[in-house]
Image: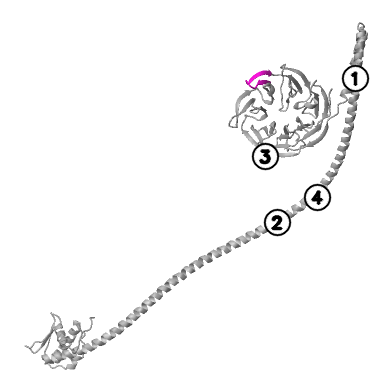
Amino acid sequence: MTEPLSINISNQEKIYKKFEEWNIALNQDSNSISISINQNDSYNIYESYFPLEFLIQFNLFKSSDNIKNIFEYISNSIEKNKIKIKVNQDNLKLILFSTLINYSNVELNLKQKKKSSEEIIELLIDDIQKLKKQNNFLTKENEIINQNLKSLNSKNDELFKNIKNLSIQNEELSQNISAINFKNIMLNQKIKSIKSKNEELTLNIKSNLKKLEKQNQKLESLKNQNLELEQKIEIFEVENNLIKNEVTTQRLEMNQEKNKIFLNEGKMNEIEQKLKKLDSIHSIETRSSITSPQLIKTITPHQNSINSVNIFPSGNIISVSDDKSIKIYDHFFNLLQTIKMAHYCGILYVDIKDDNNFVTCSVDRSIKTWIKIENKFQINHRIYDAHNNMLWKVKYYSDKFIISCSWDNCVKIWRLENNNEYQCINIIKHIRSLYSILTLEDKGMFISSGEDGSKLWNMNKLECVKVINECYSFYWNGLERLNKDKIIFGGGRNGIMKIYSISEFKVVKEINNTFCCCGIGILEKKNLFFVGGKSEDIRIYNSDNFECVKIIKSDHEDNIFGFVALKDGSIASFSKDKNIKVWSINIDID
């Protein structure tokens, strides 16, 4: 719908101009009026009379459709009623003018209504926009609320899960508490049993203390007896000396008589027989003067066989065992240090270099040297797989060398190199298994001994000086140096020991022990050596004439593996029975 035509009534020129815009042409030659709406459409209003109010009733708009409808209606009414309208130019102008006036009024009303409607529409649009804004705001708030609801729902889910977990944990805690309560009950029972055992132990300790007191009393009495015996020995020695003097005087006298009656052979024979009788009496009296060694103490430091015991220059003692441990004591056998798992298998021998260094060998085929740092010994060198079989003995030779022997029939010489590592510089082979090594540093030699006999080696040239087939040792502690020239070979199962002279390169004495010798100990201060092995007895020999001066019961329950002379003049025996026994020696041999 087009905009309504606005007409200013006071201005008549504009009215006529509107007539021209509507293409209204007045035809003066005919009795009709021609109104052209469009160029192709025209209507003739015939000459007739038509009421003026009829035309004024219509509201004319610019739209051609409305005008067309008006004139169609007029023409139809003229044809039906056969009305003739006389219209002249002035009347037509009046009609049209009045019509335009009405039209303008109507148009004004419409404009006002439109303005009011537009204002309302604008207000409505503003309200709608406000409503839209409010709606957007509400939608955003709804989205926020939905997000909060989602987060709340997720939190609620987490809370439910936590509650479930807490319930499970509470159940587990209750189970743990019940288990702890059960353990507490068991612990209380154990504590009660331990208390009862402690009471028994206290009773046992008290009884043992009483026994110890009795033993101490016995020891004191024994000490007193020893003092008495020592006094008696001194007296006996004095008497012995007197007897010796008498014998010497008698010998002098006999010699004088011998010189006097040199020609009388019968008398000479009598004198010789008398001298032999006096010598036999003297030897019997001197042998009867030897007292038995006294057992001072017994200690059980290891859990398995004790294979080797040795002495540091300071007097401290070291022992190794099949329980893989090393133990170090002071000269009273008070424990100073324990090295557990010193080797992977049993340890067979320990040799001392000085107060700060020692070396060990083991069934695990390894050699380890140990050094003292901050009053504790620790590993200095390791030689793994030193041999292809178990090592029986390892010995220091000067500061640079170590000599080892094994069941692999080999002797190996190890030298300490500049990189502070031991390197094998030579391998010496025997036909059969080797058990022992003896170093003779003052002579520049060493001896290797085993089942196939023994060999004497020059250390500098690494040449065999002498093969000693008749001398051998079946045990690692069965080869010892008696003095500068004599060596004792423990022998084998036949029990025959042999004394070998280094200077003469021959056996100078054979000793039959009737048992297999496992260990030999030298007591230089008393000029004695001790022999033990697969027997209950310990045999004591004179180092000069190799005669047995005493046989004592060892009190060991298994094989004696060796002896070691202690700094205080006593001697210690060690055994397969896990015990070390210390003996006091009060023997003097003339």
Q: Which image quarter: residue 49?
A: bottom left
Tell me the residue that label 3 is attached to: 374
Position in image of residue 303 (x %, y %):
73, 38
Q: Nearer the N terminus, badge 2 or badge 1?
A: 2
- 38 part of magenta stretch: no
| In contact (CB < 8 Å): disc 2 and disc 1 | no
CA–CA distance in space, label 3 to label 2: 49 Å
- Circle 2 packing at 10 Å, graded few (<14), some (14-19), many (20+), is few
Mark 4 lies on a secondary structure that is helix
Report whether 85 appears left or right of 159. Answer: left
Mark 3 lies on a secondary structure that is loop
Q: Nearer the viewer, mark 4 or mark 1?
A: 1
Mark 1 lies on a secondary structure that is helix
Report the amino acid beneath label 2: Phe
Mark 2 lies on a secondary structure that is helix
CA–CA distance in space, label 1 to label 3: 59 Å
Tell me the residue that label 1 is attached to: 245
Check the image and name the residue furthest to the top: 263
Question: Which of the two residues, 3 or 277, is positioned nearer the viewer here?
Answer: 277
Q: Dividing the image into 4 quarters, which one contains the N terminus? A: bottom left
Count of numbered tags: 4
Which residue corresponds to the image point at 60% horizontal and 62% vertical from the top-left? 166
Question: Which of the two residues, 177 or 463, is positioned nearer the viewer here?
Answer: 463
* The magenta segment: 454-467
Q: Nearer the viewer, mark 3 or mark 2?
A: 3
Tell me the residue that label 4 is attached to: 199
CA–CA distance in space, label 3 to label 4: 41 Å
